[in-house]
Image: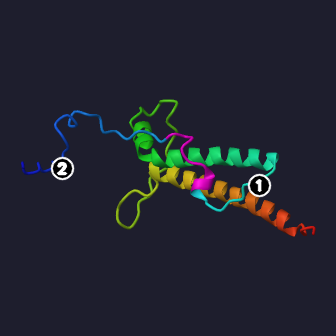
Amino acid sequence: DKPRKRKSRWGASADRGRDETPKPLSTNSTSVLDILPGLPTNLNSEQNQKLKELQKLLREANQKLENLEVEAARVDALPNDHPDRSPSPPPVYGVDGKRKNTRAFRWKERYTAQRQDTLEQILSLTTSNASATSSIAPSL
């Protein structure tokens, strides 16, 4: 009986040269039903199409929020006259002396608001469907 070899916190020697950059999530990996369980699935084709469009917008907003810091750093590194770089507003500093209106912060506010609006549209779409189906009296 050999004693068990302890795990190294840095992994095996073969893993040390491996690229550890995070892989982007598949855009088809989550549906809105995974994020918001309990949504009705008995939608008509028009509502189902609208739900798919809203799912796509929600996935895009989530993906942009995940990659926000990297993308903001990439754009900040571009020269000032580059077409991908929009002009920044004058800096605003908080009481702690840190800049409050960085590109990443402005984008985070925008994408969070976009995500929230999309979620509200999804909920209003599904609640309008639920109220329409519950208002119909069951026939006996």
Residue 37 drawn in magenta: no
Q: Position of residue 51 (x, y in %)?
A: 71, 49
Front position among marks 1 and 2: 1
| Mark identifier at residue 125 | none
Q: Position of residue 59 (x, y in %)?
A: 58, 46
Residue at image coords 30%, 39%: 20
Outermost residue, right direction? 139
**What secondary structure prevails in the magenta region?**
loop
Q: Amino acid at mark 2?
A: Arg
**Residue 130 occupies which quadrant of the picture?**
bottom right
Q: Position of residue 19 (x, y in %)?
A: 29, 34
Outermost residue, front direction? 1
Residue 33 drawn in magenta: yes
Question: What stretch of residues is rendered in magenta?
Answer: 26-34
Q: Is residue 132 visible?
A: yes
Q: Position of residue 76 (x, y in %)?
A: 41, 39
| Mark identifier at residue 42 | 1
Name the N-terminal-most of marks 1 and 2: 2
The residue under label 2 is 9
